[in-house]
Image (cartoon, rainbow, N blue to C red):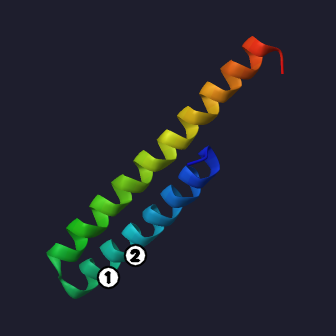
Amino acid sequence: MSSTTDKLKGLANEAVGNVKQGVGNVTGNDKLVAEGKAQELKGETQKTVGDAKDGAKNIADKITGR
């Protein structure tokens, strides 16, 4: 996956996770809140992976003179 794809999927997972948490809080559904938090954390991790890929590419570009 490209860094951009990782970042976009991460943002999507964070957004869906936040919605699940909100709905879970409003309805009193603790399971949905927990699922939402887990999905939000997954999204944060995906974004971090995308950032790391960008960083590695930038370093490689500097080394190769691009």
Q: Seen from this angle, which residue lies furthest top? A: 63
| Total marks in image | 2
- Crowding near pointer 1: few (<14 within 10 Å), some, many (20+)? some
Tell me the amino acid under the disc marked 1: Val
Is 63 or 22 nearer to us in this picture? 63
Image location (x, y in percent) of residue 23: 32, 82
Q: Position of residue 42 (x, y in %)?
A: 36, 54
Above or below for 43 versus 15: above
Q: Which residue is mark 1?
A: 23
Q: Position of residue 48 (x, y in %)?
A: 48, 41
Relative to 60, is 42 above or below?
below
Question: What is the spatial separation of the Cα atoms under label 1 and label 2, in whole angstroms?
Answer: 6 Å
Residue at (29, 62) in percent of width and height:
37
Instruction: Name the image quarter holding residue 54.
Output: top right
Residue at which label 2 appears: 19
Element at label 2: helix
Q: Residue at x 41, y 46 (%)?
A: 45
Q: Is residue 5 above or below residue 29?
A: above
Left or right of 30, for residue 44: right
The residue at 61%/46% (across/down) is 2
**Disc 2 residue type (three-letter):** Val
Residue 5 coordinates in the image, percent (x, y): 59, 54
Circle 1 SS class? helix
* Residue 53 horizontal side relative to residue 17, left or right: right
Name the residue: 83% across, 15% down: 65
Quadrant placement of the C terminus: top right
Q: Nearer the viewer, residue 22 or 55?
A: 55
The answer to which image quadrant residue 24 occupies is bottom left
